[in-house]
C-alpha cells in the first residue's frame, strides 16, 4: 500500500500508510495535475498528467516508460479503466481523449523453465508448480535463459541470475553477475556461459563480466537468435535468422564460424528450437511456418498464417501452433487436432498449453483423444502408448486401456526363438487376466502401465519388468517372465513376494512341460504346487509304466 504524491516542485514522491517516505522522489519536468495508478494485477504503473498537455506512463518507482501524445492544453484529469488497458484524459479545452495501453509480452523458456515480464519491472520465474519473482527498479527490456541461468536487460544494465529450488514451493534466485550496458540491441540471447547480442547486421559476444569477446558482421540485419542445432562435434552453437531470409547456424567460438547456412526468400521473424535440438522451426515475415530437420535441413512441415508456435517440452515431434482463432496440436507424422482457442502458445507440456492472451498467461488442458483415435485407426498403438505414458493424458487412460485390451486377445509374448513370427510390434502385448481385477483397475489409472505396454511393444522386456516392479505389480512382472519361459527368474521373483505366486509359476511351467511331453517334469511341478488333479489327469492320459500305482500314491498325498 503506497501513496503517490505529486508536488508543484515538479516531482512525485512515495509514502507508506505511516507517513514514511519509502522511495526517492522523481523529477517529472512538469506540474502534475493528475495521478492515476494501476494496481498490482494490471502491472503497477502510474499515469502522470499536467502542464504542457503532457502525460507520461511511469513504473512503480516513478521512472518514465513512455509518453502519451501531447495535447494542445493542460491536462486536468486522467483515469485508467478497470482492466488498466485504456486511459482517458480530460483537457482544459474541454475535450476528452482516450488511448489504448499495451505492454509487449516478453518471455523466454528453456525446457521446463520459463520466465516472463510482469508489468514493466518484475520477472516471474516458473518451473512446474513452483514460482519466483525478481523485482527491478528499472524497466525490463529483454530477457533470456539457458537452463537455470537467467539474463535480464534493463535500459542501462544487465543482470545474470542463477535460479534454484527452495525447500518450499518457491524458486530462489541469486544475482551472480551484473555489468553496465547502455546499448539498445535488437536481439538478446543467453548462450551457455556467454551473452550474444545483435545490432543491425552485427553480432557480438559478451562475457558475464561485460567484456566484449567477439564481434562479426553478417550479410543482413539480424532479426532473431535462438539456441543452435546439435553440431557434429557437440560444440555450443546459435541459430540466427536474417532479414534477407537466410538462417545461419553459428558456432559460438572462436569467431562465430558458420556450421551451416540455409538460404530462403522471405525475412525470418522467429526461430524456435526443439528441446532435443534435432528439429527447428522458422516463421517468416509472411507468417508461414517451416519445420526443418536439424541435420538434413529438409522441410518436414509447412503451414501458412501461423501466429505462434512451440515444441512440446518432452516429445519433440509433438507441436502446437495458433492461427485465426484456432489452436492446433499436431505430430510431425501427420496426426492433428484443432481447438477454438485464442492466444499465442508459449509453452506446451503434459497435455496442456500455456497461452499468452493480452499479457496474461492462461493454461488450457487439451484433449488428446482425437489424435489417439487417429493413431488407433492406423494401427499405431506404439506411438499412442508412448504419447500417453510421456504426456500423462488423464482422459485417455481408459480409452487406450480398452483399445489395448481389444487387440490383445490371447496373443503370446514372443520369445527369442519365435519373435520373427509376430507380424507387427504393435500387436506384441501382454494378456491381462480378467480375474486380476485390482491390477486391471490400477492399469486404467497408472501412467506406468503405458510405459510397460510401450516397452513390451519395443521388445524391451527387462524395462517392462522393471516398470512392473516400480509400480508394485509383481504379478504382471511374473506373467511377463512366464510368457518368456524364464522359469527360474519368475520363481525367484515369486519367492521375493512371500511366495504368493510360486504355485502359479510351477503350474504354468508344468503345463508347458506337458505340451513338450516332458511328463516327469510336469508331474513333479504339479505335485509341488498342489495340482494333484492335474498330475493324475496327466498320468492317466499317458499311461506310462506303473501308472495305476502312481495315481494311488498321489491320492494318498491329497490332504483331507
Image (tube, helix red, strand yellow):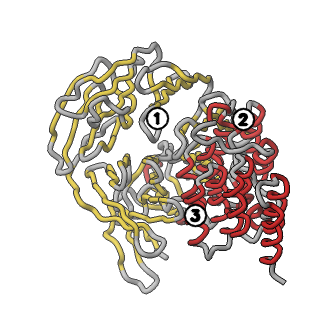
User: Which residue is at a point 78% across and 33% down the rendered structure image?
Assistant: 377
Left or right position of 111 against 429? left
Q: Secondary structure at mark 3?
A: helix
In the rendered image, residue 236, in percent from the top left (x then y), is placed at 28, 37
The label number, if any, that marks residue 272 in the structure image? 1
* Marks 3, 1: nearer the viewer: 3
Give the CA distance from mark 3 to mark 2: 29 Å
For disc 2, the neighbor class at 10 Å (few under 14, some 14 to 19, many from 20) is: some
Q: Nearer the viewer, mark 3 or mark 2?
A: 3
Task: Residue at 61%, 64% (x, y): give it.
Answer: 471
Residue 203: image x %, image y %? Answer: 25, 30
Q: Is residue 156 left or right of residue 409?
A: left
Q: Quadrant of residue 447?
A: bottom right
| 532 left or right, relative to 115 | right
Observer-nearest of 205 and 383: 383
Secondary structure type for disc 2: helix
- At x 70%, y 58%, the residue is 522
Instruction: Give the residue number, with chain letter if any, for mark 3.
Output: 469
Indicate the secondary structure of the residue bearing disc 1.
Answer: strand
* Closer to the camera in the image, 50 or 122: 122
CA separation, marks 2 and 1?
27 Å
Cα–Cα gap, marks 3 and 1: 39 Å
N-term-proximal mark, 3 vs 1: 1
Quarter of the figure that contains the C terminus: bottom right
Q: Vertically, is 356 above or below 448?
A: above
Q: Residues within 10 Å of mark 3 (few under 14, many from 20)?
A: some
Residue at image mark 2: 375
Amino acid at each position: 500500500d503506497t501513496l503517490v504524491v505529486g508536488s508543484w516542485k515538479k516531482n512525485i514522491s512515495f509514502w507508506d500508510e505511516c507517513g514514511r517516505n519509502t522511495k526517492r522522489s522523481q523529477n517529472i519536468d512538469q506540474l502534475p495535475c493528475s495521478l492515476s495508478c494501476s494496481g498490482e494485477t494490471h502491472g503497477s504503473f502510474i499515469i502522470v498528467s499536467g502542464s504542457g498537455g503532457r502525460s507520461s506512463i511511469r513504473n512503480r518507482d516513478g521512472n518514465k516508460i513512455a509518453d502519451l501524445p501531447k495535447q494542445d492544453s493542460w491536462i486536468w484529469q486522467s483515469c485508467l479503466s478497470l482492466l488498466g488497458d485504456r486511459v482517458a484524459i480530460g483537457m482544459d479545452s474541454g475535450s476528452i481523449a482516450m488511448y489504448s495501453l499495451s505492454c509487449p509480452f516478453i518471455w523466454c523458456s528453456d525446457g521446463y523453465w520459463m520466465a516472463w515480464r510482469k508489468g514493466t519491472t518484475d520477472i516471474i520465474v516458473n518451473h512446474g508448480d513452483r514460482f519466483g519473482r525478481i523485482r527491478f527498479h528499472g524497466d525490463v527490456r529483454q530477457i533470456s535463459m539457458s537452463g537455470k541461468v537467467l539474463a535480464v536487460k534493463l535500459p542501462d544494465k544487465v543482470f545474470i541470475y542463477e535460479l534454484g529450488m527452495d525447500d518450499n514451493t518457491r524458486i530462489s534466485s541469486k544475482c551472480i553477475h551484473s555489468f553496465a550496458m547502455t546499448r539498445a540491441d535488437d536481439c538478446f540471447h543467453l548462450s551457455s556461459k556467454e551473452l550474444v547480442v545483435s545490432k543491425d547486421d552485427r553480432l557480438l559476444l559478451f562475457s558475464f563480466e561485460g567484456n566484449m569477446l567477439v564481434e562479426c558482421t553478417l550479410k543482413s540485419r539480424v532479426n532473431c537468435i535462438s539456441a543452435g542445432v546439435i553440431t557434429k562435434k557437440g560444440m555450443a552453437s546459435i541459430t540466427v535468422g536474417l532479414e534477407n531470409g537466410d538462417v545461419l547456424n553459428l558456432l559460438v567460438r572462436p569467431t562465430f564460424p558458420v556450421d551451416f547456412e540455409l538460404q530462403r526468400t522471405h525475412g525470418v521473424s522467429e526461430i524456435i528450437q526443439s528441446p532435443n535440438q534435432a528439429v527447428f522451426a522458422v516463421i517468416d515475415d509472411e507468417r508461414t511456418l517451416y519445420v526443418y530437420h536439424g541435420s538434413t535441413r529438409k522441410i518436414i512441415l509447412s503451414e501458412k498464417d501461423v501466429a505462434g508456435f512451440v515444441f512440446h517440452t518432452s516429445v519433440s515431434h509433438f507441436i502446437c501452433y495458433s492461427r485465426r482463432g484456432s489452436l492446433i496440436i499436431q505430430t510431425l507424422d501427420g496426426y492433428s487436432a484443432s481447438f477454438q482457442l485464442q492466444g499465442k502458445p508459449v509453452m506446451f507440456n503434459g497435455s496442456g498449453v500455456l497461452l499468452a492472451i493480452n499479457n496474461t498467461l492462461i493454461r488450457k488442458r487439451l484433449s488428446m483423444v482425437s489424435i489417439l483415435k487417429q493413431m488407433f485407426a492406423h494401427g499405431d498403438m506404439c506411438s499412442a502408448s508412448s504419447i500417453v505414458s510421456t504426456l500423462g493424458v488423464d482422459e485417455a487412460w481408459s480409452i487406450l486401456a480398452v483399445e489395448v485390451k481389444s487387440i490383445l486377445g490371447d496373443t503370446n509374448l514372443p520369445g527369442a526363438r519365435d519373435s520373427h513370427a509376430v507380424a507387427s510390434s504393435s500387436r506384441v502385448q501382454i494378456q491381462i487376466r480378467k480375474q486380476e481385477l485390482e491390477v486391471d483397475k490400477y492399469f486404467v489409472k497408472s501412467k506406468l502401465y503405458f510405459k510397460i505396454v510401450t516397452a513390451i511393444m519395443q521388445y524391451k522386456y527387462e524395462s517392462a519388468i522393471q516398470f512392473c516392479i516400480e509400480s508394485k505389480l509383481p504379478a504382471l512382472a511374473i506373467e511377463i517372465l512366464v510368457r518368456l519361459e524364464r522359469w527360474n527368474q519368475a520363481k525367484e521373483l515369486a519367492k521375493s513376494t512371500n511366495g504368493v505366486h510360486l504355485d502359479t509359476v510351477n503350474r504354468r511351467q508344468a503345463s508347458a512341460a506337458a505340451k513338450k511331453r516332458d511328463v516327469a517334469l510336469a508331474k513333479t511341478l504339479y505335485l509341488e504346487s498342489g495340482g494333484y488333479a492335474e498330475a493324475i489327469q496327466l498320468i492317466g492320459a499317458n499311461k506310462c509304466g506303473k501308472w495305476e500305482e502312481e495315481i494311488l500314491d498321489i491320492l494318498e498325498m491329497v490332504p483331507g
